[in-house]
Image: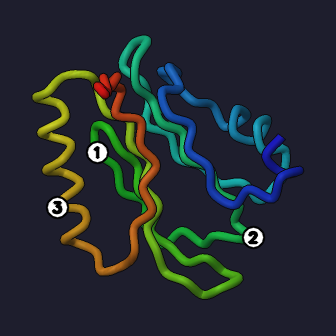
Amino acid sequence: MFAQHDIEVCFLLQTKKEICPDSFASYLWNVNDVAWHALDSEGKSRGILAMWNNIYFKTETIGYGGQWVTLFGLHIQTSFKCAVVGVYGANSIASHRSLRLELKTLDATFSVLMFIVVDFNVTFNFRR
């Protein structure tokens, strides 16, 4: 599925998978050059699967916390250094505060552009 669309980096948020076997990422991407890192779920919630194609994105470092996974690396075709972050926020206010502090620290630590993919697990009410 991913290979036919030239996807270079992908995050699956809220995987609900307590353990992510090697075969799962390979099955989804269906190419040999896929690399991945999983942040396992807690029961039936959370879980992040970060996948990237090594031909397009060279990962130098992988960082992770309780609610996020960060791929620091190089987009090979453009020689562009960046960080790609996948975030799944739990639905409590305390958890959101903690996550916000972690992301601020992450942003201050690295001097590269960050692309963030987020599911804050919140429903917003908009009034007119």
Residue positioned 72% across, 54% down in the render: 34
Name the element at disc 3: helix
Return the residue at label 1: 65
Name the element at disc 1: loop
The numbered mark, 1 or 3, whose residue comes first in the sequence reads 1
Residue type at mark 2 is Ile
**CA distance separating discs 2 and 3:** 30 Å
Residue positioned 18% across, 59% down in the render: 104
64 in relation to 18, above or below: below
x then y, percent, for residue 54: 69, 66
x then y, percent, for residue 26: 76, 41
Residue type at mark 1 is Gly
Return the residue at label 3: 105
Q: Nearer the viewer, residue 33 or 97?
A: 97
Name the element at disc 2: loop
Residue positioned 63% across, 70% down in the render: 57
Return the residue at label 2: 55
The numbered mark, 2 or 1, whose residue comes first in the sequence reads 2
Query: Which residue ends up furthest to the front in the rendered image?
Result: 128
74 in relation to 15, above or below: below
**CA distance separating discs 2 and 1:** 26 Å
Dot 3 surroundings within 10 Å: few (below 14), some, or many (20 or more)?
A: few
Dot 1 surroundings within 10 Å: few (below 14), some, or many (20 or more)?
A: few
86 in relation to 71, above or below: above
